[in-house]
Image: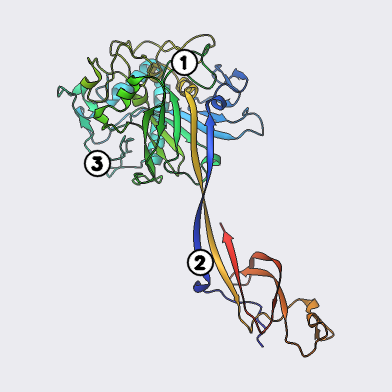
Amino acid sequence: MANTFFKSLGESERAHSRTLLHEAIPITGTLVSGTYAESAGTDTVVRGNNIKTFTHGMFQSVYDYPCVSSSANHLFDLTCGIVRKIPNTGSMATSFEGVYEHADQLYERVVTGSGLGQANKRVNIYNQMAQQLLGYDSNGDIRVFDRDGNFNDSDITSDADGRRGAFGRLQQKILDPVFINFSRLLVKDEIKKGSFQFDYGVGRYDKTTALPQGPKGPQIRISDSGAESSYKINSPAGEYGILKASEISGDTIWHIQISNSANGGTGLNVGLIYYQAGIVVLDHSRLHNVGGYNAASPSDDPVGGYIDAQRDMDGLLSVNAAMNLTSSATRYPTDGVALNAPIQNLLASGTINDMCDNYRHRICNIQFNNTTELNSTIYFCRGNHNEFNYSSNPTYLTGSQIRVKGGEYDALPRSYVTTVGMYSADNELLAVAKLSEPLRKDPTNELTLRVRLDY
């Protein structure tokens, strides 16, 4: 009988499978701000000890424990940027929602308020994230974040009276995003589509009276609901979805702003989520409108009803055009002092850390499911009736007799299978699979062992 110890496995002995494992990831506002003792950061501003700042001042890192501890796990980075150039557009087509006629006005306002260094840092951040997530167009220019993910649509529209210039709307471009970059520890292989949910405060925040986990007053829910079947694939970073806002607390004014008929009643696009990259791009101008013009009623404003004197000046899409947008912002947070200047002023007159502080303190809850992709190759190791009936183990024989026969000299040869070794083409051992108990093998039976290799 054949004395076989090695056997090649063909394609018919292999099968492949893919399993997606999901884990729920909750990040509460109390963890992001309010849980840990505070100390001064690199810019002398007092923050929780789980918030790490850097001398370059380009982003903040948030940990689940004081960041100097070896037990701390990195949760996410927070930063913001601004666009400097919109490619392939003339001066008319660079009109921006609100008070800016073109992107350069946004840049110049930041230069005036925070200095050239801060402005260029934000431009560099925008360009870096856009290169990674959007890539380049056919002319070699860096793409600009698009609100609906369609780079080929007509982005420029007129207002209700057909006016262009300062009142024309570049409705589909995100010119001043805030980025949340989640750590690979949380995201694993990707964020599960349709699972992302972000509860965000849109009211004023007074550190002396507000609850530690975030702002008082109205909140909105930002989610990618329905993204399982509507995600986009035109990104070099993988798949991404559109984030929409819906109301979860407050009064009907938020419903008017979010579900205005101009939005088709489907909620307002407020950002993008890149699933494999684990990056959320929030549209600052949609969350905290920069500029705007007076409208007698929400229906008079084609974008969604920006202006109402009764609305919180620091709320979602609610800035009155009469507000002095050039006034300097109060640094946030300051113990015992409310944020008197609206968050949109921080876009120009605050630092990146100021913007990050304000956004971070508005986080009430973030939750999503991550995804771990488990790929498996299954090998069917078959031992035919005339194979593997002998062993190469030196103890298999004693006195030229097969030990396991137990003295039955005329019995059929037999062996007991305990291990399967997987070898390379040049007979190098790559993997070992152990059986739970020895299996008897002799010429009267055949074995099929299923070995699964996960990676």
Mark 2, Cα crowd under 10 Å, few <14 / some 14-19 / many 20+, is few
Please name whichever residue, 311 or 379, is drawn nearer the observer in this view of the structure: 311
Q: Are marks 3 and 1 in contact (CB under 8 Å)?
A: no
Q: CA distance from mark 3 to mark 1?
A: 39 Å
Mark 3, Cα crowd under 10 Å, few <14 / some 14-19 / many 20+, is few
* SS for dot 2: strand
Dot 1 corresponds to which residue? 205
Name the residue at the left extreme.
162
Does the rendering let one see residue 80?
Answer: yes
Position of residue 379 measured from the top left corner of the image (x, y, whole percent):
56, 68
Image quadrant in which the C terminus is located? bottom right
Q: At 43% from the left edge and 31% from the top edge, which residue is drawn?
A: 179
* SS for dot 1: loop
Name the residue at the bottom extreme.
410
Name the residue at the top extreme.
336
Q: At 22% from the left edge and 14% from the top edge, which residue is drawn?
A: 296
Ranked by sequence position, the earlier of labels 3 and 2 is 2
Position of residue 100 measured from the top left corner of the image (x, y, whole percent):
27, 21
Mark 1, Cα crowd under 10 Å, few <14 / some 14-19 / many 20+, is many
Q: Are marks 3 and 2 in contact (CB under 8 Å)?
A: no
Q: Are marks 2 and 1 in contact (CB under 8 Å)?
A: no
Dot 3 corresponds to which residue? 152
